[in-house]
Image (cartoon, rainbow, N blue to C red):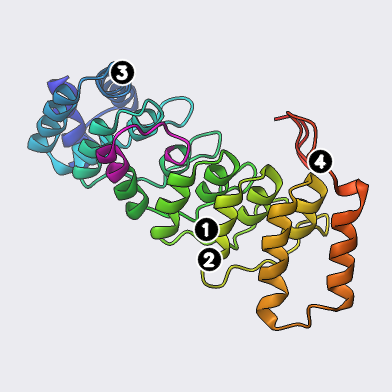
């Protein structure tokens, strides 16, 4: 391991020092050992800290290279540590100050996106998650569907993560590849408190339409979430000081009364995406 680190250091300083075969052997050795120590569910924070210190002692460039190594699925140690909720290790990686927190794996997800769905049991762990959010681009889109960390947190009802992302500047109006926003996701899945949080954000645009021409309001109505529909209607219309007795108002009231809008979609279904 130490020998491989020194070879990497020499190659970084002078790329001609190693043949391509020797370089592959060096990198494979480092990657295997680093992921063995850092990226298992059972990883020991103290051991990870020792490895980080050893890499840094050899060279800051070696530390940066090893910490940001990705496996065949494009995952780094930070991806795995977040997924395993190993927040002590996440903290160590962030404190090394060389992590590429915006690196997307082959599925298109960054560590920040994975953190939006991670299990957090202690306040100290949530502080680490918030530090991660603050270190990277919370508005980055997943390469496959264009979803953001906020959309993922909203879809899964993670109000703690929604609050953390909003505090770090998450944009409520970003649209994914289908034109959906976080507000549309919350409206579809019936997350009332999250809808309230999103609507309270300055500039939250309830008029946006997805690729099907649907708005958050029409999505809430279609899903049978009348309480959310009322909130959205008030945000979109009453905020403009429109007359409460208007064509738009009457249409909305009629929809609420219509049997078509009574009751949510069957469990396990999604308006646009099918079963979930």
| Residue 215 visible somewhere in the drawing | no
What are the residue bounds of the magenta stretch?
A: 115-128
What's the mark number on residue 32?
3
The x and y percentages for residue 136 are 37, 53
The residue indicated by pointer 1 is: 197
Report the side of 170 relative to 192 (left or right): left
Q: Secondary structure at mark 4?
A: loop
> How far apart are the alpha carbons under marks 1 and 2?
5 Å
Judged by depth in the image, the label closer to the viewer, 4 or 2, is 4
To which quarter of the image does residue 214 belong? bottom right
Question: Within the magenta stretch, is there residue 118?
Answer: yes
CA gap, disc 3 and disc 1: 44 Å
User: Is 99 displayed left or right of 273 in the figure?
Assistant: left
Q: Nearer the viewer, residue 160 or 103?
A: 160
Q: Residue at x 33, y 49 (%)?
A: 130
Q: Nearer the viewer, mark 1 or mark 4?
A: 4
Label 3: how many residues lie within 10 Å, few (<14), some (14-19) or many (20+)?
few
Q: Residue 129, relative to residue 21: is it above or below?
A: below
Spot occupied by residue 44 in the image (x, y as percentages of width and height): 20, 20
Question: Can you identify the residue that label 4 sits on?
Answer: 263
Q: Earlier in the sequence, mark 3 or mark 4?
A: 3
Tag 1 near tag 2, CB within 8 Å: yes
Magenta stretch contains residue 260:
no
């Amino acid at each position: 391991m130490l020998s491989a680190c020194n070879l990497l250091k020499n190659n970084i300083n002078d790329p001609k020092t190693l043949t391509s075969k020797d370089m592959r052997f060096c990198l494979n050795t480092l990657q295997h050992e680093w992921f063995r120590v850092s990226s298992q569910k059972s990883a020991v924070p103290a051991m990870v800290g020792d490895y980080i210190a050893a890499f840094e002692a050899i060279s800051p460039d070696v530390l940066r290279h090893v910490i940001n190594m990705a496996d065949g699925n494009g995952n780094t140690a930070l991806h795995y540590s977040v997924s395993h909720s190993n927040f002590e290790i996440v903290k160590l990686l962030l404190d090394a100050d060389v992590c590429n927190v915006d690196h997307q794996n082959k599925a298109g997800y960054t560590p920040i996106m994975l953190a939006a769905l991670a299990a957090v049991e202690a306040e100290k762990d949530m502080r680490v998650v918030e530090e991660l959010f603050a270190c990277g681009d919370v508005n980055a889109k997943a390469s496959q569907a264009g979803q953001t960390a906020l959309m993922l947190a909203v879809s899964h009802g993670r109000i703690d993560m929604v609050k953390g992302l909003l505090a770090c500047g998450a944009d409520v109006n970003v649209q994914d590849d289908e034109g959906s926003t976080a507000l549309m996701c919350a409206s579809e899945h019936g997350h009332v408190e999250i809808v309230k949080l999103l609507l309270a954000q300055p500039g939250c645009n309830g008029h946006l339409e997805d690729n099907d021409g649907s708005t958050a309001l029409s999505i809430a109505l279609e899903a049978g979430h009348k309480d959310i529909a009322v909130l959205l209607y008030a945000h979109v219309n009453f905020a403009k000081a429109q007359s409460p007795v208007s064509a738009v108002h009457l249409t909305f009231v009629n929809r609420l009364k219509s049997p078509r809008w009574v009751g949510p979609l069957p469990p396990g279904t999604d308006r646009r995406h099918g079963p979930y």
